Image (cartoon, rainbow, N blue to C red):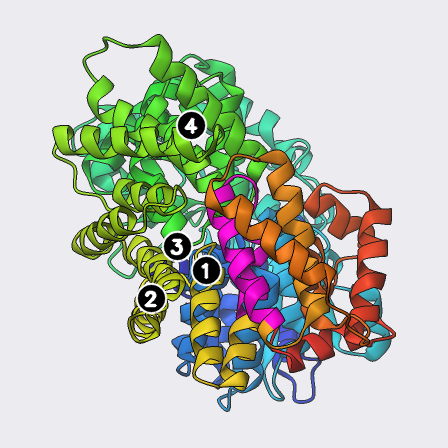
Amino acid sequence: MTSKLRRPAARPGTVPRSPLVGRLAADGSPPIVAVIAPSGYGKTTLLAQWAELDGQAFAWVSVDDRDNDPKVLLSYVAAALDGVQPVDKRVFEALAAPASSVPGTVVPRLGSAFLSMTVPVVLVLDDVHLLRNTECRDALSVLADHVPPGSRLVLAGRDTPPLRVARLRTQGRILEIGSADLSMSRQEAASLLSAADVPLGDDDVAALHQRTEGWAAGLYLAALHLREGGSLRDAGDAFGGDDRLVSQYMESEFLARISARHREFLTRTAVLERMCGPLCEAVLDLPQADTTLGELARSNLLLVPLDRRGFWFRYHHLFRDMLLAELERLEPGLLPVLRRRAAAWCQANGRPEEALEYAMAAGDVDMAAELVQELAVPARRQGRVTTLVRWFRWLDDRDAIARYPMVTALAALIYAWMGRPAEAARWASAVDRWDQENPVRPDRGVIGAWAALVRAFACQHGIAQMRIDADQAVRRFQEAGIVTGAAALLQGIARITSGDLDGGDAALADAARLGQQAGTDGIAAEAMAVRSLAAMARGDWVRAEDLAGQARATLRLAAEEDSYIAPLVCAAEARAAIHRGDVEAARRQLVSAQRARPLLTYAIPHVAVQARIELTRAHLALGDTAGARTLLREIDDLLRRCPHLGTLVAEAEALRARIGAERDPRAPGASSLTAAELRILPLLATHLSYPEIAAELFVSPNTVKSQAYSIFRKLGASSRNEAVIRSRQLELLDG
């Protein structure tokens, strides 16, 4: 976090870019700044000099590849802004919630917090070209609409920033700095060469400046070449206005002229995203590597410090690319070896996620699977869905789905929690196959417990089999000495939906106790909600209301208020509120349930159907037949796919008969939004087009368009913007 948010210092030896800094700092400048140029033009250096000379507060985020997850990226943005002025805690709550919607909750809250800042701030995101994730790019585009007066949003990178640039130009809201602006003047070129201890005459400077077209990196590399004894003519020929000839120069000139020790150090440490002495020592198997690192840091501006202590460094991106190309040319077989060593060092030094990235880069499937097993649950609790999917897909692409059953079990559960039923079912089937094909493996005890849990959770073969699987999971976890409330939760649900209310209630009480004991409060909240609904079935409304309140408090404690558990808790609270006559409280709960309902898919059929049955009862109690009918259609779809759900089938049939006799003269409203429409709704608040939304959701553009028009009709809106405004008024979206 510290190195990511640390503003780069203006380093000795760099050339002042005073005219450009003056343009950036001028009063009345547009609120959006785009600094776009190829590598080596001094984008970061320019912004660092601006920050050094301007009295305004700067919030800085250095983007890297691992930020292609909206929760990760926006957590850094929020932390950077919080360092200038405290950010509304609701932003961090949304970021911490595992299932919170990025477009529907996180971005609106962060945008509102940015817009309400009273301290002028320059928010810089450096290297935004590394962001390929659509949600990340769109989040920044939306953030650009929330820059407060006197503040600036600066995006620096190698290509067009993720903004609606044409619109911003028309509105006069963007200042664009390009490669032509960043190209050094002849005087600046002379200053750079002089600072690098390469004094040249005016004519030589002019010739070199003309050949490099003022490209800062080219001029600096030429200075290094000359400092090591190279000729001026060779330097001029090697460095044009881009990097097309630089690799050739690196191979034939620069690396050939430096010491063998430094050459080996530079090329081999290029595998590292960032480096420190101990890490270099481990990767190179070279004692006192920190000494060499210090020498290079003092003599070369292409080694960038990441902290004030001079402990962590990285190479300038262009320089690293060149060094890696050289390593791949000379020692291609060494790349995976070096990366495995880096992974081992990171793992041993409490940096498991960096270890995972190096293991993946090295193609080490065994180590990657071991680390994913360790990191999957924490990443899910942080809501880092995109990162999790990337890890799982990487393993899947290497045929690891059947070889690492613990990872496969975690993936099956996490995909189900994420509302991605097809993936959940595929991974769950792989766990089941492994369990059947490996009856005598020594590690079968723990993995067998997880396999039984996944089978019970998926409930693919009905409630009767779910009950057998849940009982087996409880027994196996106990034999393995593992404390978890998950198995007891499923055991309780299976018993209740089999008609055994007393046995189910006892198991659910155990689940709540074990869940709180193990720190899995989401499990405890779900157990309390199901117990509350069972108490209602008995007519014990005092106990039901008490349990519903406990479920809500526990769900809030778990930061799971946007998870698949939320609709069940909302249903319990809504029915309790209706019973005591608090209609407004019941309606609020029903709206809250709508936000998370798309997560309730056939991957969790028992929860998906039970929650909808209870919500249907609440809608009917409030006289909302249209909302009840929508829910019943979704129940019928689920029962067609999963027909053997015990007592839930009869409960659905009773509701079907009741709704069939109802007449509702009112037109369908917001309560009748389907799960598919609720899934699209948050994306309407973004800058994504309908085809882009379709690509995000893996549906056709026509489907998105027809569902959007259905949303407009139900919300009484005539446009996308009106629908978003109406959704925010109804609290279906934040903002």
Could you tell which of marks 1 and 4 lies nearer the N-terminus?
4
Question: Which residues are drawn in magenta?
Answer: 592-620
Q: Residue at x 42, y 61 (%)?
A: 97
Magenta span has 614? yes
Q: Amino acid at mark 3?
A: Gln
Q: Name the residue nearer the viewer: 33 or 610.
A: 610
Q: Amino acid at mark 4?
A: Met
Residue beneath the point at 49% across and 79% down: 578
Is label 2 in contact with label 1 (beta carbons under 8 Å)?
no
Q: Quadrant of the N terminus?
A: bottom left
Residue carrying label 1 = 568
- Residue that mark 4 sits on: 360
Q: Amino acid at mark 1?
A: Leu
Residue 662 screen position, x and y as percent: 73, 67
Residue topped by disc 3: 382
Three-letter amino acid code at the position of disc 2: Ala
Marks 4 and 3, the one that precedes in the sequence: 4
**Between tags 2 and 4, which lies in front?**
2
**As drawn, is 270 to the left or to the right of 708?**
left
The disc, 2 or 1, on the residue closer to the chain's N-terminal end is 2
Indicate the position of residue 712 as horizontal and vertical percent values.
82, 69
Look at the picture and state if 153 lies above or below 391: below
Residue 551: mark in rendering: 2
